[in-house]
Amino acid sequence: MKGVDIVRSTVLALVMIAAAGPMVSSVDAQTEGAEAVAIVVHPEVTIDGLSFDQLKSIFLAEQQHWPDRSRITLLVRAAIAPERDLILSEIYGMTEDRYRQYWISKMFRSEVASGPKIVFSTDMLRDLVTVIPGSIGFVPVSEVGPDLKVIPIDGMLPGDEGYPLN
């Protein structure tokens, strides 16, 4: 039994290190007047909009497949990105530390095969969301390009009054 405990402890340590990323607090990463965040998906994802509750379910990995049964791949910016703070606050309702604990727990309970894919730049996210089938991520609205499919939330787009990620 001790061998299993050692393996489990080692896996937990590795998961915590991998999930931790740069040690930046939400307060350190926040900027005043942060811009709205657009939710973007792979161009072949067959949805044209999400409710905020559906979006939250996807980001919490409670919903892991699109309506066509294709797997959802969650792309999340690294802890240094100001838009990540908005997502943690508005979608997850969590601090950075709680977010990390959440994903470690989900993986340990085998509720997910892996946590979100960590993306280190907006350019990288734009590139990945266009090539990974079923992917979803978020970018500052000013970084949305013509190759990205922006998903309305509750029928609203970034900049609309009442949009939840402004």
Image (cartoon, rainbow, N blue to C red):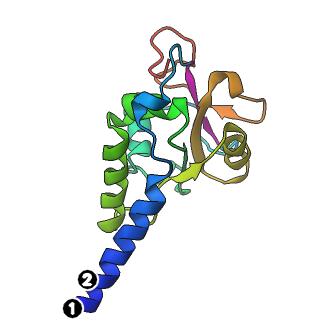
- How far across and how far down the image is residue 121, in percent? 66, 41
The secondary structure that most of the magenta stretch takes on is strand
The amino acid at mark 1 is Met
Residue sitting farthest toward the top: 161
- Disc on res. 1: 1
Q: Could you tell me which residue is drawn at 76 percent across and 29 percent down?
A: 145
Task: Give the SS element for disc 2.
Answer: helix
Tell me: 26 left or right of 42. left
Q: Is residue 15 magenta?
A: no
The range drawn in magenta is: 35-41
| Residue receiving disc 2 | 5
Q: Could you tell me which residue is drawn at 53 percent across and 13 percent down?
A: 33
Residue 51 seen in render: no
Up/down of 49 relative to 133, above or below:
above
Q: Could you tell me which residue is drawn at 50 percent across and 17 percent down?
A: 166
The amino acid at mark 2 is Asp
